[in-house]
Image (spheres, rainbow, N blue to C red):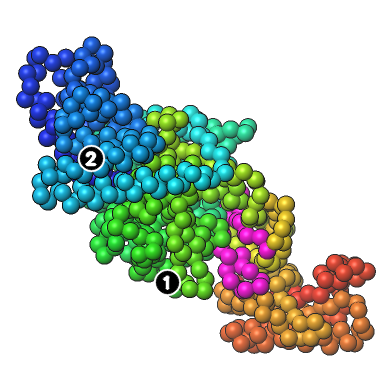
Amino acid sequence: MKLIRLSPTFFAFAIFLLYVENTNAQQRNAFFVKADEVLTANRYDEAARLYKEGLKTDPEDLAAQYSCGISLFKAGKKANSLSYFKTVYHQNPHQDKYLLKYLGRAYQLNYKFDSAIAVFKEYEKHLHKHAQEQQGTEKELIDKRIQECLSAKLLIKHPKEVKIKNLGNAVNSPYDDYSPTISADEKTLMFTSRRDHVEIDENNFSKKEQKYYEEVLISEWEDSTWGAAHGIGENVNGRRHDASVSVSPDGQRLIVYKSTPQTKGDLYYSQLVDSIWNEPVKFGGEINSHHFEPSAVINSAENSLIFSSDRPGGFGGLDLYISKLLPNGQWGKPENLGAGINTKYDEDAPFLQADEKTLHFSSNGHNSMGGYDIFTTVFNQTTKAWGTPENAGYPVNTPDDDIYFTWNNRGTHAFFSSIREIGMGGQDIYMLELPEDVPSIVIVKGVVSDKITNSPLGSPLKVTVYSLDSNKIVGFYNSSHATGSYIFTVPHDDTYGMQVEAEGYLLHSENFTVPKTTEVTELSKHVELQPIKEGNKVVLNNVFFQYNKSKLEPGSKMELKAVKDFMLKNPELFVEIGGHTDSIGSEQYNLRLSEARALAVKKYLEKLGVQSNRLTYKGYSFLHPIASNQTEEGRKKNRRTEFLVLTYKP
């Protein structure tokens, strides 16, 4: 899936192995002979084990000490390589021309930044030993490493107040476990693993990489703990690399990465149908290319996709791009997020927070402490540009790779992958907790049912949420095909309109307000839909008028547009727009006001394209209350616009 790139010079270690092979193999420890063999086959863990066994009896073999350090480094146990490189350096600093570079990096990974800087500077003095074409590349890398150490020293001086916890052995394993994505209800964790878990057959081992192929695993939150991970299913996990990337905000669409013999790796999406993830479909348009596309995130409206790619035309390595969905349903031409975000190194693993203006990603450029660090940038609505990326700081970031950062819906916990001493092997998945569990967003969830039968609706449902203040879409959400349940999140300090649509049913709408300061973290809104049937009616809850007038408020536009779309989808439908008032004032006055308001809605719908002969209107004054007129809350409910089915013959 998402490959951690090593400097090409690392592979020059093969030159050093020639030295080993030219020695008299019969005089060397048998463990070393076997270790040399498996090291050349890239079986690093096995090689390290064999070298360690041999060094118990032959600790003076510097070639074995160095090779053991190399094996540990390439096996992902980089910090553990320090003692071996130090041993070689103190006895023969000229053992290999790359020794100082490895030693410096090992110091860096062990937080010994001053020692690392000193060794890197010493290495720089010996760059003349390299081929002419390598010297520039090596100097650039060493200068970068020194800058990483300086950045690390600064960031560690000002640590972030967060708690970081390993998710434990139900999720993590001795192998690489990474790229976590959390479901909307926070009860299902999906992630990628390279363990010896067999979903399809026993042929899930990559001989080229000497690792198991990636598979998507799932862990469920039960009894206050994560359950044992298991495969997501054969529809998603195939015979090569299959990796989790991100999940849509409504939890119904999973973006996955898949590799084939013909591609470097492409992006797909899988839909959740009846609690089963279906076979992934490849993204269309120019999202995928002949190059490497490992990561992506989609917004709530599912009309903007931010993804990573190493296609030509970028700033170098992996870059972040954005593609927007066109009116014809195709993904538009991707646009590079620009030099403010992308560097000549790698930017990967984008995650868009619920406010849809805060983007988290990982980069081994910018002011990284070393390897991939997690960064945050905020989109400026005024300048229409992303802000300067800010390092997430220590202890979120370390001198090794920290990547695949994703928040839960409430913004109180984050999950990410990291290589740490407290880990269980390779990359592990960790949870970040903020010091104060103060929600910045609210979860809204519920079940949609048939009002007549009271049964949950399993048919495809669409939930639209928008701001009544700005008339801007917050997101489009799907419900569960099996249960009719839905879930979404909204930020504080706004009033929202909500529409629920299902084929064969009348449009349902309502609204709710989330104050700027509130302790509420979750709202339940169970929705009952009425079938499209003569005599059935619904309240258009998001149609508003100016006080004592028939002029529509701007916040009514989204509701009436939805009514227009509903009428156009159902051309056999003829309806009455009914106006109702509260009991304040005379019956005659309220009759005129209710008629004028019903007429205003009719005219607005006609202006949007609904045929006039399909719409009638009527004012009812205060003669048909649905609540008590003795309270303001009741009067508010009585001031309403209704949508009544007169005839319907599909």
Instruction: State yes or no: residue 488 in magenta.
Output: yes
Q: Compared with residue 441, is residue 386 higher up or lower down, i.e. above or below? A: below
For marks 2 and 1, give the one nearer the viewer.
Answer: 2
Q: Residue 618: which quarter of the image? A: bottom right
Q: Is residue 186 visible?
A: no
Q: Nearer the viewer, residue 382 or 510?
A: 382
The amino acid beneath tag 2 is: Glu
Q: What is the quadrant of residue 101 in the picture?
A: top left
The numbered disc on residue 111 is none
| Circles 2 and 1 in contact, beta carbons < 8 Å | no
Say which mark, if any, is on residue 326.
1
In percent of width and height, residue 598 lies at: 75, 83
Query: How many marks are shown on the rendered structure?
Result: 2
Q: In this view, does 556 lie to the left or right of 401?
A: right
Which residue is tagged 2? 122
Q: Which residue is drawn at 23% across and 36% down?
A: 100
- For residue 292, say whether it is visible: yes
User: Where residue 608 sits: x, y (%)?
Assistant: 59, 84
